[in-house]
Amino acid sequence: MAENEKEEYIEVDGHKIKKTTPSEEPVKQQPTGAPGLEPANSSSNIKLVIGVVSGKGGVGKSLVTSLTASLLQKSGIKTAILDADVTGPSIPKMFGLKRSGGVAEDNGEEMLPGVTESGIKIMSLNLLMPGETDPVIWRGPVIAGVVKQFWTDVQWGDVDVMLVDMPPGTGDVPLTVFQSLPVDSIVVVTTPQELVSMIVEKALNMAAMMNIDVCGVVENMSYIMCPHCGKPIYPFGEKENDAGAIRRGIDVVGKLPLDPSISALADKGEIEGYETQDLELLVSAINDMLDRK
């Protein structure tokens, strides 16, 4: 326990629970947000770092990350993905990558990212594991340490935009990313249900506490295109915008449909083949940030 802290206890249902509270001595706060505390690899030149987050799982962060990276790369922007979802890394499969990248020849302690057909650079734990279905049974601090290493020990080269696909929630890994990487902004992924919107606001609150800007909200599973009449159907109810985003004055920068062809391409490792205009506002916002760097 630090010298500037003291032990206190609270009682809950007759049980004593220890808590730690700061003493009157002021505590020096570590800086958070950009610029990051950890230097990038000496062989890396990364202009813009954007986190893709949500308050809960299953909303499609990896899908939004993959589609956004594909659109950026196709437009001539050098793009990379740091897969920080260590225990649930789906990025490599969506791009058809297996045990790619490897150890750098000039420095055996550093790593090289895998590269997709269109040139997107990717680092994910699944590219290093013997089998893609091998589980990662590690505690939070170990996982957070791996994410740091993906930033400091990978030779990324020249990258215009790095997207960081984060695990759900506001735990160890998002905190590590926000405190250790120079995150310029985040994209928040949600689905059009009030329950999800409420939970996503936790991610927005965390970003505000860490002084990280929010690029916008992407609403996944927003609608279905009727195969007969070609009009959109809203399975979760039609809303003009995400309620949580409106309350915060945050732009909705994309609405993705429930589209079986997306799943088919992702399963085949051909996500780069999906064409969409639903993320044009997000790509435009990222371009604007890149121009200001």
Image (spheres, helix red, strand yellow):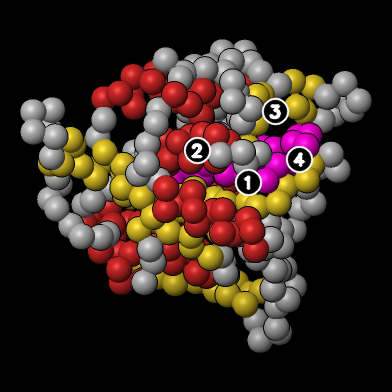
41 horizontally vs 179: left or right: right
Q: Name the amino acid type tagged 4.
A: Asp
Q: Which residue does the numbered mark 2 point to in the structure image?
A: 71
Where 268 sits versus 290, above or below?
above
Q: Give the number of the mark in front: 3 or 2.
A: 2
Residue drawn 51% across the image and 29% down it = 91
Gap between marks 3 and 2, in whole Å? 19 Å
Q: Name the amino acid type tagged 1.
A: Val
Q: Secondary structure at mark 4?
A: strand
Specify few, some or many for label 3: CA neighbours under 10 Å numbering under 14, 14-19, or 20 or more: many
Q: Name the amino acid type tagged 2.
A: Leu
Gap between marks 2 and 4, in whole Å? 18 Å
Residue drawn 62% across the image and 41% down it = 77
Where 116 sits versus 38, above or below?
above
Q: Secondary structure at mark 3?
A: loop
Image disc number at residue 158: 4
Image disc number at residue 113: 3
Q: Earlier in the sequence, mark 3 or mark 2?
A: 2
Identify the image quadrant of residue 278: top left
Q: Start and end of the magenta stretch?
A: 143-172
Residue drawn 72% across the image and 47% down it = 46
Q: Residue 116's x, y, as percent?
A: 60, 23
Q: Give the number of the mark in front: 2 or 4.
A: 2
The answer to whether one can see residue 121 in this image is: yes
Gap between marks 4 and 1, in whole Å? 9 Å
Q: Earlier in the sequence, mark 3 or mark 4?
A: 3
Q: Earlier in the sequence, mark 2 or mark 4?
A: 2
